[in-house]
Image: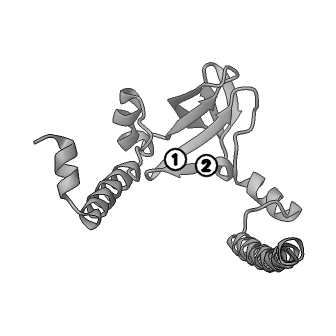
Amino acid sequence: MTQETIQKEKGLREQLKELNETLSLIKETKGKKKELKLPYKVKAAMKKAANKRKIIVFLLGTDRQIRPTLAEIKYGIVFVNGQAHQATTDFVYYYRNTPTLIIPEWSLTPIGTQDYYDAVEQGKTIEPQTIILRAMEAAQNQMLKNKMSGKMLIYVLIAAAIGGYVLFGRG
């Protein structure tokens, strides 16, 4: 039997059921996310990094590359590729419980939490409540637009019926 004859023998419900099963399998495989993979040297030294005053540094290069490295903190300064950068606690994040800095290559100061506080003062943060309210308003506006188009459809049908009667009814 060929694939076509097998499909013809199956009913519509069975085919829909198979299709839904394959779609659910596809969705499950797409939902899995891969984590960031660090270079072996950085990953191996990560466990001992905090104890030896070392920190993971994600260096944002001018060539649009991100280079993860390990660096040692001395007196609030971290040296990466011979360049000194500020490394106070205001700029430290944690990646898997390991202290981490995100440093643009062209700047002395890393990306830190001060940027967040500045955004809060300027009202540029993403608040979940405001996003939810905006989504609800958009859905409500969409419903209103759909209702208006439904009314317009009824008016058009009534006008077409009257026009048809006027044109063809007097015959």
Whether residues under marks 2 and 1 lie with C-beta atoms below 8 angstroms apart, the answer is: yes
55 up-or-down from 114: above or below:
above
In the image, is 53 to the left or to the right of 165? left
Label number found at residue 92 = 2
Q: Residue 59 at x, y = what percent?
A: 61, 30
Q: Judging from the image, what secondary structure is the residue with disc 1 in?
A: strand
Label number found at residue 99 = 1
* Residue 149 occupies quadrant: bottom right
The structure residue drawn at horizontal position 77% and vertical position 79%, both measured from the top left corner, is 147
The type of residue carrying mark 1 is Pro
* Residue 38 occupies quadrant: top left
Q: Residue 35 at x, y = what percent?
A: 42, 44
In the image, is 61 to the left or to the right of 156? left
The type of residue carrying mark 2 is Val
Q: Find the residue positioned furthest to the left.
A: 1
Quadrant the N terminus occupies: top left
Quadrant the C terminus occupies: bottom right
